Image (tube, helix red, strand yellow):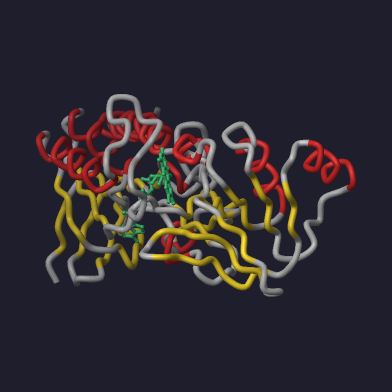
Amino acid sequence: MTVNETEVVVVGGGAAGLQAALVLARARRDVTVVDGGEPRNARARAVHNLAGHEGVAPACLLELARDDARRYGARIVRDAVTEARQDGSRWLLGLRGGDAWRARALVLATGVIEELPPVEGLDALWGGDVVSCPYCHGWEARDRPVAVVGTGERAWRQVLLLRRFTGDLALLTGGPAGFDGERLAFLRDAGVSVREEPIARVVAEEGRLSGVAFAGGDFLPRDVVFAATSRRQASALPAALGCEIDGAAVVTDRTGRTAVPGVWAAGSCADPALTVAGSAGHATTTAIAVNDALLDEDTGLTP
Ligand SMILES: Cc1cc2nc3c(=O)[nH]c(=O)nc-3n(C[C@H](O)[C@H](O)[C@H](O)COP(=O)(O)OP(=O)(O)OC[C@H]3O[C@@H](n4cnc5c(N)ncnc54)[C@H](O)[C@@H]3O)c2cc1C
């Protein structure tokens, strides 16, 4: 097996990984991105809240970002890192396709996965008429019939945000809402209809949401559903490397450094709440910290 040498491997080529690669390549580091090609927003119609690229298609944005990183010499490999182990002072990575890469530093930019509530029909419309983030997609849902599907704190926050976008908002919990009397009274006074009966399915017509069918036979016409999703790490790699995982996040310091020497985490895998712009910003900080650490290492002196 041939082992390819590079200074930094970035695992993941979404907004965070490609931004880290751009910063490192422009700092004249030899950087290799290994990307499985499944960014979290792949099925979204557009990327919003990204000044300068507002409304761009997700695939188009990443194509531009790959071109930018390549322009400064970054390599981008379409594959998945399936194993990683320490090899002296280096990291040795095995890829699903059989290649291997050895690197001085590792940047994990592997993202998170959003788990939908277990309601039939949600997944088929995910990224289109079923979304989760009101900051990203609330504007497009303004003044339209909207439902939040799910329970817990996430559903509560979604309702608080979305009632600023539409006066026709329903919270569909599929069972007991689990909110105290004060919250339920607030929702009632705010004109949010809370329906706790079991949900049969989310119904689509010609690929667009038409509404929500309840197990009892009722049908609620809706244009958009915000699902109260939960998040988890997209890759088993951070945990396999020995990184601490807290909830859905890889634990790092402010610069993205994990407790595992030579391993950093950038973007949403380190902070699952980060947007595209936030992930790229976080990755910039991380890339600078990685380069700083390599500069110290280059001197051979104790920092
Ligand atoms: C439906 C939807 C719509 C959204 N809309 C918006 C929006 O409008 N605006 C906004 O700012 N944010 C939006 N987001 C959030 C946005 O998707 C995230 O903020 C962003 O994708 C985080 O970037 P990231 O690089 O950290 O992770 P990701 O974009 O998820 O990229 C991670 C990459 O790592 C790769 N990977 C994982 N494991 C491995 C491995 N072992 N080996 C190799 N590669 C690996 C994956 O294949 C993927 O390509 C949306 C999210 C969803 C789900």
Residue 297 found in image quarter: top left
Residue 301 found in image quarter: top left
Residue at the (40%, 37%) spot, across then down: 279
> How far across and how far down the image is residue 65, in percent?
21, 39
Horizontal relation, residue 282 to residue 22: left or right? right
Residue at the (48%, 51%) spot, across then down: 131
Residue 210's place in the image compared with 271, above or below, is below
> How far across and how far down the image is residue 282, in percent?
41, 33
Horizontal relation, residue 266 to residue 18: left or right? right
Horizontal relation, residue 164 to residue 276: left or right? right
Horizontal relation, residue 6 to residue 110: left or right? left
Residue 265 found in image quarter: top left
**Quadrant (top left, top right, bottom left, bottom right) of the C terminus:** top left
Residue 232's place in the image compared with 300, above or below, is below
Q: Could you say which is closer to the camera, residue 205 or residue 283? A: 205
**Quadrant (top left, top right, bottom left, bottom right) of the N terminus:** bottom left
Is residue 232 at all visible to an observer of this figure? yes
Residue 99's place in the image compared with 169, above or below, is below
Q: Could you say which is closer to the camera, residue 197 or residue 49? A: 197
Residue at the (59%, 37%) spot, across then down: 166
Q: Could you say which is closer to the camera, residue 294 or residue 245? A: 245
Residue at the (65%, 57%) spot, across then down: 150
> How far across and how far down the image is residue 81, in percent?
30, 63
Q: Residue furthest top?
A: 52
> How far across and how far down the image is residue 31, in percent?
20, 43
